[in-house]
Image: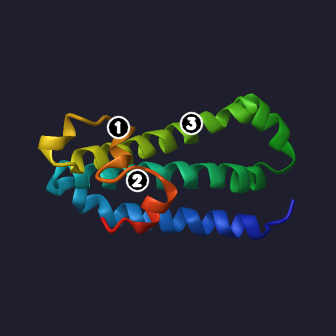
Protein backbone atom coordinates (compact mmCIF):
# COMPACT_ATOMS: atom_id res chain seq x y z
CA UNK A 1 0.00 0.00 0.00
CA UNK A 2 1.38 3.41 -0.90
CA UNK A 3 1.14 6.73 0.89
CA UNK A 4 -1.23 8.70 -1.34
CA UNK A 5 -2.82 12.15 -1.55
CA UNK A 6 -5.70 11.16 0.72
CA UNK A 7 -3.14 10.22 3.39
CA UNK A 8 -1.54 13.65 3.04
CA UNK A 9 -4.88 15.46 3.29
CA UNK A 10 -5.99 13.35 6.28
CA UNK A 11 -2.67 13.97 8.03
CA UNK A 12 -2.91 17.70 7.33
CA UNK A 13 -6.47 17.74 8.72
CA UNK A 14 -5.17 16.02 11.87
CA UNK A 15 -2.37 18.55 12.38
CA UNK A 16 -4.63 21.54 11.70
CA UNK A 17 -7.38 20.09 13.90
CA UNK A 18 -4.92 19.76 16.80
CA UNK A 19 -3.75 23.35 16.23
CA UNK A 20 -7.34 24.64 16.26
CA UNK A 21 -8.02 22.67 19.43
CA UNK A 22 -4.95 24.11 21.13
CA UNK A 23 -5.93 27.61 20.01
CA UNK A 24 -9.36 27.34 21.67
CA UNK A 25 -8.39 25.66 24.96
CA UNK A 26 -8.17 29.09 26.68
CA UNK A 27 -11.75 29.79 25.57
CA UNK A 28 -12.97 26.77 27.54
CA UNK A 29 -11.28 28.08 30.70
CA UNK A 30 -12.72 31.62 30.41
CA UNK A 31 -16.36 30.50 30.51
CA UNK A 32 -17.77 32.76 27.81
CA UNK A 33 -21.49 33.40 27.33
CA UNK A 34 -23.65 30.31 26.76
CA UNK A 35 -24.11 31.02 23.03
CA UNK A 36 -20.37 31.39 22.45
CA UNK A 37 -19.62 28.31 24.53
CA UNK A 38 -22.09 26.24 22.49
CA UNK A 39 -20.48 27.46 19.27
CA UNK A 40 -16.97 26.63 20.50
CA UNK A 41 -17.96 23.17 21.74
CA UNK A 42 -20.03 22.54 18.59
CA UNK A 43 -17.12 23.47 16.35
CA UNK A 44 -14.77 21.32 18.43
CA UNK A 45 -17.02 18.28 18.12
CA UNK A 46 -17.50 18.77 14.37
CA UNK A 47 -13.78 19.17 13.81
CA UNK A 48 -12.97 16.14 15.98
CA UNK A 49 -15.57 13.93 14.29
CA UNK A 50 -14.40 14.93 10.81
CA UNK A 51 -10.70 14.50 11.58
CA UNK A 52 -11.36 11.19 13.31
CA UNK A 53 -13.25 9.77 10.34
CA UNK A 54 -10.79 11.09 7.77
CA UNK A 55 -7.77 9.68 9.57
CA UNK A 56 -9.41 6.35 10.29
CA UNK A 57 -10.23 5.68 6.65
CA UNK A 58 -6.92 7.04 5.29
CA UNK A 59 -4.10 6.62 7.79
CA UNK A 60 -5.25 3.65 9.86
CA UNK A 61 -5.81 1.79 6.60
CA UNK A 62 -2.26 2.75 5.55
CA UNK A 63 -0.70 1.83 8.90
CA UNK A 64 -2.37 -1.58 9.09
CA UNK A 65 -1.38 -2.43 5.50
CA UNK A 66 -2.27 -5.96 4.49
CA UNK A 67 -3.97 -6.52 7.85
CA UNK A 68 -6.56 -3.80 7.08
CA UNK A 69 -9.51 -6.13 6.26
CA UNK A 70 -9.00 -8.15 9.46
CA UNK A 71 -8.51 -5.01 11.58
CA UNK A 72 -11.57 -3.30 10.07
CA UNK A 73 -13.76 -6.35 10.67
CA UNK A 74 -12.42 -6.80 14.23
CA UNK A 75 -13.52 -3.31 15.27
CA UNK A 76 -16.96 -3.50 13.66
CA UNK A 77 -16.52 -2.71 9.97
CA UNK A 78 -18.54 0.31 8.92
CA UNK A 79 -20.06 0.60 12.41
CA UNK A 80 -16.90 2.44 13.48
CA UNK A 81 -18.46 5.46 11.74
CA UNK A 82 -20.98 5.66 14.58
CA UNK A 83 -18.27 7.12 16.83
CA UNK A 84 -17.40 9.97 14.46
CA UNK A 85 -21.09 10.49 13.62
CA UNK A 86 -21.84 10.91 17.34
CA UNK A 87 -19.36 13.80 17.50
CA UNK A 88 -20.84 15.35 14.36
CA UNK A 89 -24.40 15.03 15.67
CA UNK A 90 -23.41 16.55 19.03
CA UNK A 91 -21.67 19.43 17.26
CA UNK A 92 -24.63 20.15 14.99
CA UNK A 93 -26.97 19.99 17.98
CA UNK A 94 -24.81 22.52 19.85
CA UNK A 95 -24.84 24.86 16.85
CA UNK A 96 -28.65 24.69 16.68
CA UNK A 97 -28.82 25.17 20.44
CA UNK A 98 -26.64 28.27 20.13
CA UNK A 99 -29.08 29.68 17.57
CA UNK A 100 -31.96 29.06 20.00
CA UNK A 101 -30.11 30.73 22.88
CA UNK A 102 -29.23 33.71 20.69
CA UNK A 103 -32.94 34.54 20.36
CA UNK A 104 -33.97 37.27 22.83
CA UNK A 105 -35.62 35.82 25.94
CA UNK A 106 -38.97 37.45 25.19
CA UNK A 107 -39.20 35.44 21.93
CA UNK A 108 -37.26 32.30 22.91
CA UNK A 109 -40.27 30.57 24.49
CA UNK A 110 -42.04 30.51 21.12
CA UNK A 111 -39.30 28.40 19.56
CA UNK A 112 -37.56 25.08 19.96
CA UNK A 113 -34.24 23.91 18.61
CA UNK A 114 -35.72 23.23 15.15
CA UNK A 115 -38.00 26.24 14.78
CA UNK A 116 -35.22 28.57 15.96
CA UNK A 117 -33.68 28.44 12.48
CA UNK A 118 -36.65 30.50 11.26
CA UNK A 119 -36.03 33.37 13.67
CA UNK A 120 -36.55 36.25 12.90
CA UNK A 121 -37.61 35.48 9.32
CA UNK A 122 -39.43 32.50 7.79
CA UNK A 123 -37.20 29.80 6.36
CA UNK A 124 -37.86 30.02 2.64
CA UNK A 125 -35.01 30.03 0.18
CA UNK A 126 -35.51 33.62 -1.12
CA UNK A 127 -35.85 34.97 2.43
CA UNK A 128 -32.70 33.12 3.52
CA UNK A 129 -30.75 34.83 0.73
CA UNK A 130 -32.04 38.26 1.80
CA UNK A 131 -31.30 37.81 5.52
CA UNK A 132 -28.80 40.19 7.06
CA UNK A 133 -28.49 38.76 10.57
Q: In front of the other: label 3 or label 1?
A: 1
Q: Report the disc number at residue 44.
A: 2
Of pointers 2 and 3, the one earlier in the residue sequence: 2
The structure residue drawn at horizontal position 65% and vertical position 63%, both measured from the top left corner, is: 10
Q: Quadrant of the N terminus?
A: bottom right
Q: Is residue 92 above or below residue 21?
A: above
Of pointers 1 and 2, the one earlier in the residue sequence: 2
Residue on which the image places disc 1? 113
C-beta proximity under 8 Å, tags 3 and 1: no
Indicate the secondary structure of the residue bearing disc 3: helix
Q: Is residue 108 above or below residue 119?
A: above
The structure residue drawn at horizontal position 71% and vertical position 50%, both measured from the top left corner, is: 57
Residue at the left extreme, as displayed: 106
Whole-number angstrom distance, CA of label 2 to CA of label 3: 15 Å
The coloring applied to the image is rainbow
Of pointers 3 and 1, the one earlier in the residue sequence: 3
Q: Looking at the rendering, which quadrant does residue 78 occupy?
A: top right
The structure residue drawn at horizontal position 41% and vertical position 67%, both measured from the top left corner, is: 130
* Of the pair 30 and 22, the residue shown nearer to us: 30
* Of the pair 88 and 61, the residue shown nearer to us: 88
* Of the pair 13 and 46, the residue shown nearer to us: 46
Left or right, residue 120 beside residue 44? left
- Residue 21: x %, y % from top left: 39, 60
Indicate the secondary structure of the residue bearing disc 1: loop
The crowd level at tag 2 (other Cα within 10 Å; few <14, some 14-19, many 20+) is many
Residue on which the image places disc 3? 83
Amino acid sequence: MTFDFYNVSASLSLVLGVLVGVAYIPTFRRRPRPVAMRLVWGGTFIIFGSVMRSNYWANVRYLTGENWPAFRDAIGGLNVNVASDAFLIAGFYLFLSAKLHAIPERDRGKHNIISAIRYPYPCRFPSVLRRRD
